[in-house]
Amino acid sequence: MTMDLWNFNKATLQQSLQKSNEELPDSILKEQAEALGKKTDGLVYGKISNMKYELKNRKEKYTMATMFDIIVPKLESYRYTLFIMFSRPEKSYPVAITVGRSITEETDKLTPQYVCKNKKDFMAALKKTLSSEEVTNTIETLYLKALKS
């Protein structure tokens, strides 16, 4: 018989999966990406992608960059990075969010607009970002251009 010293099993992992849909920033971002597509009938939708992140000065604690991109299929699959969330894959929080900057701009020095220590902070930052006038205008413009093409 094999000795099992782990403190979890399939049932506890399934419970964690259910909790993650409500708690994890990545799950919340995916939910918002889907909501954008539904609100625009798929003319504009969100896409979440992850990549390993490493700062040149290596002082930051974040090792993963999650891009929230807006995609417009009718405009040659135009892609616009709305914001980037920086995190550590093994932890839910803290996360840092930069808005309106590319990943290449964040390799020398991370300059987040938000640092979220918990879900409450994250939801407040996400709501402020997604409901901002700038983001609303961007979505409206892309939606109208997609309708006309």
Image (spheres, rainbow, N blue to C red):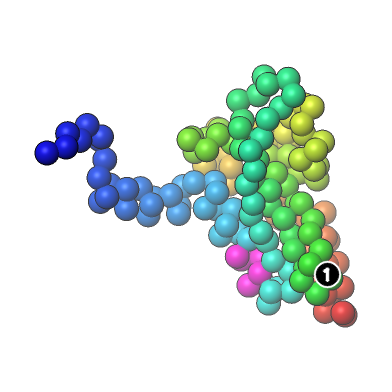
Please report the residue visible at 87 percent of the width from the left and 73 percent of the height from the top.
145
Assign the N terminus to one quadrant of the image. top left
Judge the density around disc 1: few (<14), some (14-19), many (≥20) Cα neighbours within 10 Å: few
Q: Position of residue 109 (x, y in %)?
A: 77, 26
Q: In the image, 44: left or right of 93?
A: right
Q: Tell me the residue that label 1 is attached to.
A: 76
Q: Quadrant of residue 105?
A: top right
Q: Is residue 12 in sight in this rendering?
A: yes
Q: Position of residue 82 (x, y in %)?
A: 75, 51
Q: Position of residue 16 (x, y in %)?
A: 35, 48
Please report the residue visible at 74 percent of the width from the left and 24 percent of the height from the top.
56
Q: Can residue 36 be found in the magenta stretch? A: yes
The magenta region covers 34-39
Q: Position of residue 122 (x, y in %)?
A: 58, 42
Q: Is residue 95 in sight in this rendering?
A: no
Please report the residue visible at 63 percent of the width from the left and 38 percent of the height from the top.
52
Q: In the image, 125: left or right of 28?
A: right
Mark 1 is on which residue type? Glu
Q: In the image, 53: left or right of 16?
A: right
Q: Can residue 22 be found in the magenta stretch? A: no
Total of numbered circles in the picture?
Answer: 1
48 versus 91 height, above or below: below
